[in-house]
Image (cartoon, grey):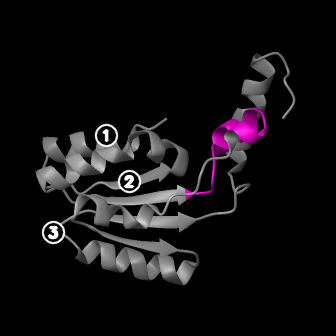
Amino acid sequence: MGFAVPAAVGAQIGNRDVRPLVFVGDGAFQMTGHELATVARLGLNPIVIVMNNKGYTTERMIREGPYNDIHDWAYHLRPQIVRTGWGCEVRTEGELEEALTTARTNTQSFSILNLHLDPNDHSKALERLGKRLRQRLGGIKK
């Protein structure tokens, strides 16, 4: 958890012809998203999509509780903090298409999309993983 943004830094430093497309959960971003300062300092230009569902969804699949909820940040405003980059909020499919088009043309700096999702939005695969982990942890209830 929290590996996506730092991994993008390494990938782009390793090959400047690569432009990472980063999918990161909001909880993970709150742990290591500050690496966008490194991105800014080095002039890198990844496209970062923060999947903002206001918490730790993977952990919710294992065991639900208020400890999985996190404070909602304005992730799209991160460019104001590091004084470079482009950000926007995304709430609909149409907004996502527009944002991705803009992000792709913004090659001079990073782009960050604050993609709002329902806190219970998850894949069937994540649900299966959560169930198996619950079982391994002694059958704790979701």
SS class, disc 1: helix
State the image coordinates of residue 137 (x, y, percent, origin top left).
76, 17
| Mark before the other along the chain sequence, 1 or 2 | 1
Q: Is residue 128 visible?
A: no
Closer to the camera in the image, 123 or 59 = 59
| Mark before the other along the chain sequence, 3 or 1 | 1
**CA separation, marks 3 and 1?**
20 Å
- Residue at image point 42% right, 74% down: 88
Quadrant of res 7? top left
Numbered label attached to residue 7: 1
State the image coordinates of residue 79 (x, y, percent, origin top left).
30, 64
Disc 3 target residue? 108
Is label 1 in contact with label 2 (beta carbons under 8 Å)? yes
Region rendered in magenta: 52-67
Disc 2 target residue? 22
State the image coordinates of residue 140 (x, y, percent, origin top left).
84, 24
**CA separation, marks 1 and 2?**
9 Å
SS class, disc 3: loop
| Residue type, mark 1 in image | Ala
